[in-house]
Image: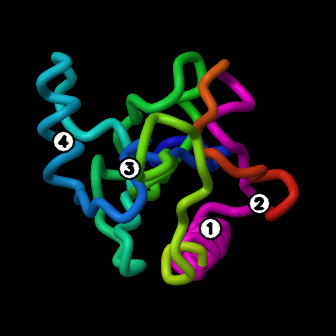
Amino acid sequence: MRNLKKIIIHSSYTPEGREHDVKDITAWHKAQGWSDCGYHYVIKLDGTIEQGRPVDKIGAHCKGQNQGSVGVCYIGGMDSSDRTPKDTRTNEQKEALILLVESLKTVFGELTVHGHNEFSTKPCPCFDVQSEF
């Protein structure tokens, strides 16, 4: 198993209320030449947690940080009318994210939790991860 130190949270940066899943994201990432979904987990609007890339494989979600991290992506992150960043998480997504983070910490030890925007100029995940975790 990889030596994990971090959980990095992302948004799919898709319009509010528009459902996508791990199959969609995998197709997007493969179209960019990647081998698989870049994220390890995807959280759908109803709070369903889908497995993306296996956790024992290095992700492709955060340049310079993939080696020791788990990538988690929630569907949304953009206003429904344009490309304005927005925290669009449903209550179900918020609950699922908390449960997933707690579960990962139970399995892998004391992991730190970060937003993608801590390592990039992107607004992703469109909420302040440090204030919530």
Q: Earlier in the sequence, mark 2 or mark 4?
A: 4
Q: Secondary structure at mark 2?
A: loop
Q: Are marks 1 and 2 in contact (CB under 8 Å)?
A: no
Q: Which image quarter: residue 116?
A: top right
Spatial CA distance of label 2 from label 4 is 29 Å
- Identify the residue at horizontal 80%, vertical 62% (top origin): 133
Other residues around mark 3 within 10 Å, as few (<14) / some (14–19) / many (≥20): many
Q: Please provide the residue range marked out in magenta.
A: 95-120
- Identify the residue at horizontal 58%, vertical 17% (top origin): 64
Q: What secondary structure do most residues of the magenta stretch adopt?
A: helix
Q: Secondary structure at mark 3?
A: strand
Q: Which of the two marks, 2 or 4, is nearer to us in this view?
A: 4
Q: Are marks 3 and 2 in contact (CB under 8 Å)?
A: no
Q: Amino acid at mark 3?
A: Pro
Q: Which of the two marks, 1 or 4, is nearer to us in this view?
A: 4
Left or right, 21 with respect to 57, comes to left
Other residues around mark 1 within 10 Å, as few (<14) / some (14–19) / many (≥20): some
Q: Earlier in the sequence, mark 4 or mark 3?
A: 3
Residue hosting label 2: 110
**Residue 103 belongs to the span the image colors magenta:** yes
x and y, in percent, of residue 12 in the image: 40, 45
Q: Amino acid at mark 1?
A: Val
- Identify the residue at horizontal 29%, vertical 60% (top origin): 18
Spatial CA distance of label 1 from label 3 is 24 Å
Q: Earlier in the sequence, mark 3 or mark 2?
A: 3
Residue hosting label 3: 15
- Identify the residue at horizontal 64%, vertical 75% (top origin): 98
